[in-house]
Image: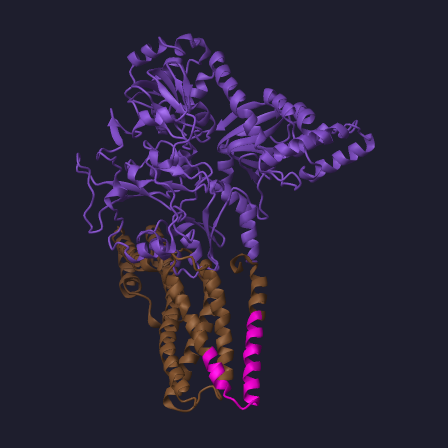
Amino acid sequence: MLSKMPFRKRRILMASLTVIAIAAVWTASWMMESRLSNPALLSGSVVLGSVVFLILLGVRRRLPMIPLGSMSTWTQIHLYTGVFAIAAYAIHVPALVVGGYFEVTLAVLFIVVSASGMYGLYASRTLPRVMTAVEGEPRFDQIHWHRQQLSHTAMTLLQSLDDDASVTVLGNYYGQQLARFFGTGPSFSYMMIPTGRQRRRLLAGLKELHRYLEDDGKQVAGQYAALVRKRDDLDFHYAIQFRLRAWLVVHCVFSIVLLIGGSIHGLLAWRFAG
Amino acid sequence: MELSETIAVKRPSRWDEPMDPQMTPADVTWLRSREPFSSLQADAFPRSMPLEGILQNDCRLHRVEPGEIIVREGDYGNSAFLVLSGAIKVLVESLPPEQLGRSERHQASWGEALWSYLRRSPVPESRDPHQVTLANESGESQIRAVDDRQAFFLQDFDAVLSRSESVELGPGELFGEVAAMYRSPRNATVLAATEASLLEIRWQGLKVLRRDEAFAEKLDAHYRANWLAIHLREIPLFRFVPESNLSRVVAKTEMRSHGRMEWNADYKKSRKLAPAEQIASEPIVSDEGRYPTDLIVVRTGFGRMCQAYGAAQRTSAYLGKNHLFGLEEVVHNAVLDTGEPPMKLQNTLRAVGFLDTLHIPVEVFAEEILPFVRRSELPSSAAQKIVRSSASDQDERRAPKRTDTERTSMETAKRGLNAKADIQTGTGTQYDQTDMLEFLVQNRLTNGRQAMVIDLNRCVRCDDCVKACAATHDGNPRFVRTGIQHANLQFTQACMHCTDPVCMIGCPTGAISRDQESGVVSVHEPICVGCSVCANSCPYSNIRMAEVSDRSGKPFTDSTSGKPIMKATKCDMCHQSPTGPACMNACPHDALVRIDLNESAPLSAWLEQRS
């Protein structure tokens, strides 16, 4: 049903349900506190239950052949349950990071998982558009192969030159700048923040060479410029797709650690609840 | 340019690729001595396409053995068969799929789906022996070679013939011509009762043979008597037309074909043409600016409606089965006020690939059909005109019509149409964005009934769709997440389960077939002989041939030739999985959908949902 609903309507419905759920937990905690009972037990159970439910998304993802509802419905429920869990956590803890090594670790884990989840939501809604705007649709697992193909083409392009002057000028530029660009992967800084700085620098360099080249050489320089653009687009796709995968790895790994830690914390709290 | 600079080549001709290069002039002479060819008028054929040429190039001689299945119900074909000797049987009742070597559709339970996932093979494209070949109880295969081709034999066919009702056809009788001429599914299974000789005639040949008046009359009479009324009844707009009127329409309607049925062969070249060039290359069915003489109904194939715009043509809609062309103009002209000029056609209709049309003369439409069409289902301008005209005339003709309408409402209900609800008149499929329309027609995506569309603005390129597909198909994904792109939409390379499934034409064993209920086109692997006909025919390259091996990785090979066994693989919409299409269910961001592109409504609604 959720997957058929217009997105705007779905957002309003899910946000309203989340607000109602948060209000219910807050009211229940407040009532327990005013009766001098222990509301942390309730809010803690809600947080732990939410974390368990949130982790079930990964299980559902690995069992696509079982009719447990569509992944999109699960993702929607996951998103809003995540928001609800953050609110329930805020109700549960007296401070964002509390005292005690174990509790501090748990709090940090919760913050990392929540923050990575929020980032994931932001990234998955914004980065696809960024990728669509850039030429090509390379598959992540094939990008390395595409890079090798470009590197090979760049090398053979140089060998196709007959004119000595062009061989010298373009050969020098290839040896000093392009060989490294085509032969190695993108730098760490590019992976973090992909910019067009290197692309612009190389393209400007190639344009600068035009005054030393005959027509044939200029044509080859133009082909190099096209290869530089292609390679940069490929690196851009790689950086963005890597980011979209990396946040998920961080989110999943920390979620599992949080689940284990949270379960231990829950057991201890239940044992010593009196 | 100097003449010496030109390159002289042999101009391609109609019969560069004969249907059967083995046909000899002696065969042709022999055929000319037999009916119906002995009585055909040779001078009815043009000199460039003589009767002998048709027999030599558009025909193939077949020897069939008892029990051999010649055509299967539901299959698509582009040729008809003439019985030369022996007897063949047309089965009146449908055979169960397993008798045709097709496994019955089995919906796996949760447990079965999970079990097959857990025991999935580590080897790509692995099969169990029973999935590779079909053998009967005595261990004999149901697929045998007859002369130089593979044929499928019905097991225990004597018992089948005695159990089921059948019609025997003998020498001189023709069958399969309706499916061949009008690109419709075969409506019965036909098998050889005795050893028999058949002449297979491809549709191009049939079309030319129709130049002989007697032959054409025979074919047309058969179509008109048995099929035309059924096809007209399928048109939703005509649902209230009484039977008596419909039979008069049948008598006056003309059938015409446009374009090439082998559009899939041209597609790869034509899609690369600039839109203006592509439109110009499409045959014109009816031209903008002329007065309409017929209401045109699309029977099969696709048509492009376009209008002159600047120096070129702009696509305004595309038409598919049962869509009408010229309705607004025909209705307008049928209720003209005195002195008012008639309306000319506002659009040109062109055949995209091939197009079969029914032409209902305007006067027949006005007299026999229009009074029984709901005003609310007509184009608004035409409907308003009728309302105005009937108000001014105080026309009394409506009284008897109402009783007719009541009479036909029972018929309508029987046809599965809601008599009370209005229907949308099929006068073409349109999109708000003209560029989307142009793109879909240019790339023939309008053929797709289950096209995979990915919204790249939401797709995070996680490939969960591909992984889910692999998980549902023993580790082998049945599509690649790549495809042509328009704006932020990617039309992915996965089988679209097309309206016109050209892949099904020519399969020698009927291994590729369409499920009547779901419309899913799937491959029945045990009877797939790996000939690649389907893969080569698919214009979208969505069928892949795979070498198969057992679960330990040992490849299956042919016991006689030693060559590897190949199977055609493609998307089957996970029709055996309890989840339905795994790709769509696995997408966490609502980026992927399986959608019918025959009509604009599903795609427009999907785009609207996310706007």
Task: Magenta stretch: give its range.
Answer: A17-46
Q: Is A140 included in the stretch rendered in magenta?
A: no
Horizontally, residue B196 falls left or right of residue A70, namely left
Chain in purple, by letter, is B
**Horizontal and vertical percent for residue A14?**
55, 67
Is B122 or B3 nearer to us in this picture? Answer: B122
**Residue A20 image point, x, y percent:** 58, 74
For the N terminus of chain B, which image quadrant? top left
Colour for chain A in the figure: brown
Magenta stretch secondary structure, dominant: helix
- At horizontal 56% and vertical 63% (from top left) the residue drawn is A10
Q: Position of residue B445 (x, y in %)?
A: 47, 43
Q: Is residue B26 above or below residue B261?
A: above
- Depth order, front residue of B207/A157: B207
Vertical placement of residue B144 versus B530, above or below: above
Q: Is residue A36 magenta?
A: yes
Q: Which quarter shows the C terminus of chain B? A: bottom right
The residue closer to the viewer here, B493 or A129, is B493
Task: Locate residue A269, reporting x and y percent.
Answer: 41, 86
Q: Quadrant of residue B306?
A: top right
Residue at the image position 43 percent from the left and 10 percent from the top: B40
Chosen colour scheme: by chain
Residue B14 visible within the image: no
